[in-house]
Image (cartoon, helix red, strand yellow):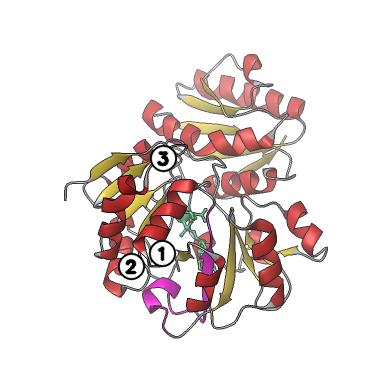
Amino acid sequence: MNTKIVQINPHSFTPAALAEAAELLRAGKLVAFPTETVYGLGANANDPAAVAAIFTAKGRPSDNPLIVHVADEEEVAQIAAEIPPVAITLFRRFWPGPLTVVLPAKRTVPTEVTAGLPTVAVRLPSHPVARELIRLSGVPVAAPSANRSGRPSPTLASHVWEDLAGRIAMIVDGGPTGVGVESTVVDVTSNRIVILRPGGVTLEELQEIDPKTALDPALGFAPGQTPKAPGLKYTHYAPKAPVVVYEGTPRSIQEAIRQTAAAETAQGKKVGILATAENAPAYTAGEVLVAGSRCDLTTVAAALYDALRRFDELQVDLILAEGVPEEGIGLAVMNRLRKAAGGNVVQA
Ligand code: TXA
Ligand code: MG
């Protein structure tokens, strides 16, 4: 398949620029598009064959359900059997934006979307290109992140190309995504807010709506616990080289990484260091990639996945990654880093 690329300036475009992409979606084809979190791989959510094609293109396990992206809040009623009051509160506060809400599904939602669960995840993205594309297509759009399964999510159109060229009809290139990590997935089917996947909307922000907002207990790495978001049980967000995450104070992390990098380099290993701007100057061995600043963890989130992909290009043997405080978006960053590390975490 020939994958077409369409370039769109997200700050200034006409609907006509997205007409072909919308037509492809309606016709059951796969179109990658930018959202404010990461690039999504879209298909018409009402078309079971189109949705099934997403799983083939990504190599995604069939028991991992998809998020349905809508053009406005009213469209949720076509997909959800019930919308509890807390969901309405969340829509009003965080939509459009990086929050996905799990609701009881209508029977008409294809099982290819829900992976057979009685629930469906819905999201109204804020990215202007995503919103216009969904609106023009006239259908709800099922979309996972537009990476090959197990790879870091794409934050640039070139990442989508690396993973999916030749496997999908079109990539809409709207430049870099903003947030850099995926949406926060919450379950409200118990009328409480439970975070199944930390993301762009923070725990602290959700606690302003309900102070009892909790993390899915299975989000930790305790053996025998299965996360409620099926996608989180897979090794995910992973670059090719093994990753070790260092937690501690900025100084203790820096010291531990310096020592390990020196020792591994002496053994002939090519070491990658995922550094924050503050600590980076101290690293003298290895390939150092700076992913954001400790002063503003949103910059770390925005740079994370591109850095993990660049370590693949550099063909490093090992990646030593600085941990960050689990505050604000730092919670999502650490969730992704721990998963990339397969739980390989060092207390520095
Ligand atoms: O920011 C995002 O959410 C991006 C953009 C493209 O919108 N999408 C994304 O989709 O990250 P994906 O498929 O890569 O991750 C969706 C996560 C998976 O962990 C999946 O298991 C979970 O949401 N999920 C989907 N439907 C669910 C449901 N009904 N119940 C529980 N978890 C669900
Ligand atoms: Mg994904």
Q: Tell me, yes or no, whether the two marked residues, 3 and 1, touch with CB atoms within 8 Å.
A: no
The mark that comes first in sequence, 1 or 2, is: 2
Disc number placed over residue 51 in the picture, else none: 2
Q: Callout 2: helix, strand or loop? A: helix
Q: Quadrant of residue 86?
A: bottom right
Q: Position of residue 133 (x, y in %)?
A: 39, 54
Which amino acid is tagged 2? Val
Q: Is residue 115 magenta?
A: yes
Q: Tag 3: Cα neighbours inside 10 Å, few (<14), some, or many (≥20)? A: some
User: Disc 3 or disc 1, which is closer to the eye?
Assistant: 1
State the residue lying farthest toward the bottom: 107
Disc number placed over residue 240 in the picture, else none: 3
Q: Quadrant of residue 17?
A: top left
> Looking at the image, which residue is at 31% across and 72% down?
47
Task: Using the rendered image of the protein, determine whether residue 190 is visible from the camera's viewpoint.
Answer: yes
Q: Position of residue 152 (x, y in %)?
A: 45, 45
Disc number placed over residue 142 in the picture, else none: 1
Q: Tell me, yes or no, whether the two marked residues, 1 and 2, touch with CB atoms within 8 Å.
A: yes
